[in-house]
Amino acid sequence: MPSHSKRGAEVPHSPIRSLLPYAKAAKAQGKHIFHLNIGQPDIETPVEALEAVHKSTGKIISYGPSEGIPSLRETVAGYYEKFDANLTANDIYVTTGASEAILFTLLACCDPGDEVIIPEPFYANYLGFAQMGAIHIVPLTTTLETQFRLPEPEVFEQLISPRTKAIFLCNPGNPTGQLYGHAELQKLMKLVRKHDLFLIVDEVYREFCYGKPFTSVLSFEEMEENVIVIDSISKVFSSCGARVGYLITKNRHLQRIVDKYAQLRLSPPYFGQLLAEACYLHAGDYIERAKAEYDRRRHVLYEGLSSIEGVECYMPEAAFYNMAGLPVTDAAHFCKWLLTDFELDGNTVMLAPGNGFYFHKEPGKNQVRIAYILNEQDLRHAVECLKEALKRYSLIYGEYSTGKVVVREWE
Ligand SMILES: Cc1ncc(COP(=O)(O)O)c(C=O)c1O
């Protein structure tokens, strides 16, 4: 048999999808699952945008420009004015979701063996994309105790080596739901300029900030050479399947490279781009309504989690995630058990094990990421399920007490 690539074998599985076979089996047994494991919004896609796609009169679905349809790029440049970003259409590359923008960015900034510093926990797919390019992720661990706040720039600086090419942030954070403010970003901006690095910021959750204002790194005047922003319509407009994202940079050298990558894959999705443009132009107050809905759910989830003995959590500032610590020693085992062995009136809950969002697996071992992408009523039921599950689990596997969990052998 021909041998496959070592690189391919080493790319990690998505931690978010790793429990799917158990979920499938649970459903086959007739269980209903409250899905809190995946960042797939349940809010409907803007109807005006769907109509624009239905009305499309094209007779041939042809390739489009590799960098994206001009009118969409213009529209997106206009959208960024509200974030004080002075962009032209030329600074915006339409990609096949933020996912492709992440891959293009890493492959445009780094050679094999180069390093990128990323605060952990981080969106798990960064690791897989980096490994596809033989790029090393250098994690900087942030903690639940400090609500995953960014450390001072000196801590980043200690990790900079001759191979470091970039600092990569997710702001607002997935999985943490935390928001880095203007002052923190300004300090990092200074650091990347001092060391001549790129600052890559994934801003796909920018519209869902509940209190503190959002600062885009595109608003910094000195950002021209150093900054790359990743964006997407997947979350903002509940359009994950449209596969439209953006890579945004004013760095002309990077743009020339991204041009070539974009040409290699010919063009971004045609219908997705139609939908995206209509979202910006015709969706009215859609974003405000979606944000208000997530905000209500954020409170429901936080209050629910806070009422469960032994659960460590905080009120997230943004996005639609809460990274909570559970009174178990191995959250991955607990998440699997929820699907295989637990039910409450025919229901169970699916959560994303926290360790999949860390490079170092230990710090996230008792954590789970909970996405509040269910309506308030379902969310309350899901929290009840979780509460009951933790009680039963502790009876089987260990004592269930705040701060001190004694676990019996389970394998
Ligand atoms: C932080 C972050 N970046 C990127 C993506 C991928 O987005 P897209 O659907 O646009 O590829 C996700 C999806 O969950 C995400 O959470």
Image (cartoon, rainbow, N blue to C red):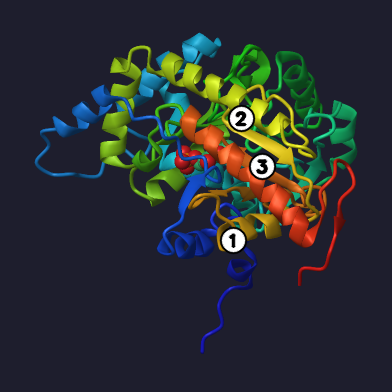
Q: Is residue 222 visible?
A: yes
Crowding around mark 1 (Cα neighbors within 10 Å: few <14, some 14 to 19, many 20+) is some
Q: First in sequence, mark 3 or 2: give its number.
A: 2
Give the labeled residue for mark 1: 13
The percent coordinates of residue 43 (x first, y second) are 39, 30
Q: Determine contact: label 2, label 1, CB under 8 Å.
A: no
Q: Is label 3 in a helix, a strand or a loop? A: helix
Residue 63 x %, y %: 25, 44
Q: In the image, what residue occupies the spot 64% across and 55% down?
A: 335
Where does the C terminus fall, quadrant-wise? bottom right
Residue 6: image location, x then y, percent: 63, 72
What label sits on residue 301 in the rendered view? 2
Q: Is mark 2 on a helix, strand or loop?
A: helix
Task: Work out whether mark 3 precedes mark 1 in sequence or the reverse, and give the earlier one.
Answer: 1
What residue sits right under mark 3 in the picture?
387
Residue count near mark 2 (Cα–Cα under 10 Å), binned few <14, some 14–19, many ≥20:
many
Give the mark toward the camera: 3 or 2: 3
Given residues 45 and 157, the one toward you in this image is: 45
- The kind of residue on which mark 3 rests is Lys
Q: How far apart are marks 3 and 1 (CA)?
A: 29 Å
On screen, 90 above or below 167?
A: above
State the image coordinates of residue 35 (x, y, percent, origin top left): 50, 45
Q: Which residue is drawn at 43% across and 25% down?
A: 90
The amino acid sitting under disc 2 is Leu
Callout 1: helix, strand or loop? Answer: loop
